[in-house]
Image (cartoon, helix red, strand yellow):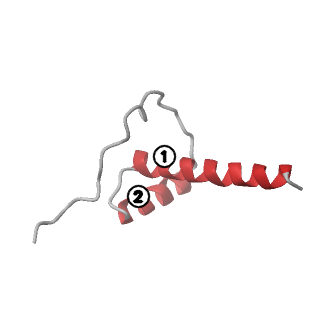
Amino acid sequence: MKNVSKIGRTPKGATSQPLGVRLAPDEVLEVETFAAAQQRSRAWFLRFLILRGLADYKRELATQTTH
């Protein structure tokens, strides 16, 4: 059986605006640990967290406006 890597291509246009992020040393270590566990790069994992956080934030905003 062929060993297939989990690392995929970044969606087109995703790298159009690079952003700098400052993290504490323990946060960097945590990100690196989780990224390695998923066999992903730090950049991929940080993008994943940001997209997930944005989705949660939008859901939270939607529930606030309906109450």
Residue ID at (44%, 52%): 45
Q: Position of residue 41 (x, y in %)?
A: 36, 50
Q: Amino acid at mark 2?
A: Ala
Q: Position of residue 10 (x, y in %)?
A: 36, 42
Residue under pointer 2: 35
Residue under pointer 1: 47
Residue 2 is marked as none
Q: Amino acid at mark 1?
A: Arg
Residue ID at (10%, 72%): 1
Q: Position of residue 62 (x, y in %)?
A: 76, 51
Q: Position of residue 4 (x, y in %)?
A: 19, 62
Please tell me whether mark 2 or mark 1 is closer to you in this view: 1
Left or right, residue 3 beside residue 32 = left
Binning the other alpha carbons within 10 Å of mark 2 as few (below 14), some (14 to 19) or many (20 upward) gives some
Q: Earlier in the sequence, mark 2 or mark 1?
A: 2
Q: Residue furthest top?
A: 16
The span from disc 2 to disc 1 (Cα, nearest Å) is 11 Å
Q: Please identify the quarter of the rendering in which residue 40 is found.
A: bottom left
Q: Secondary structure at mark 2?
A: helix
Left or right, residue 7 beside residue 32 = left
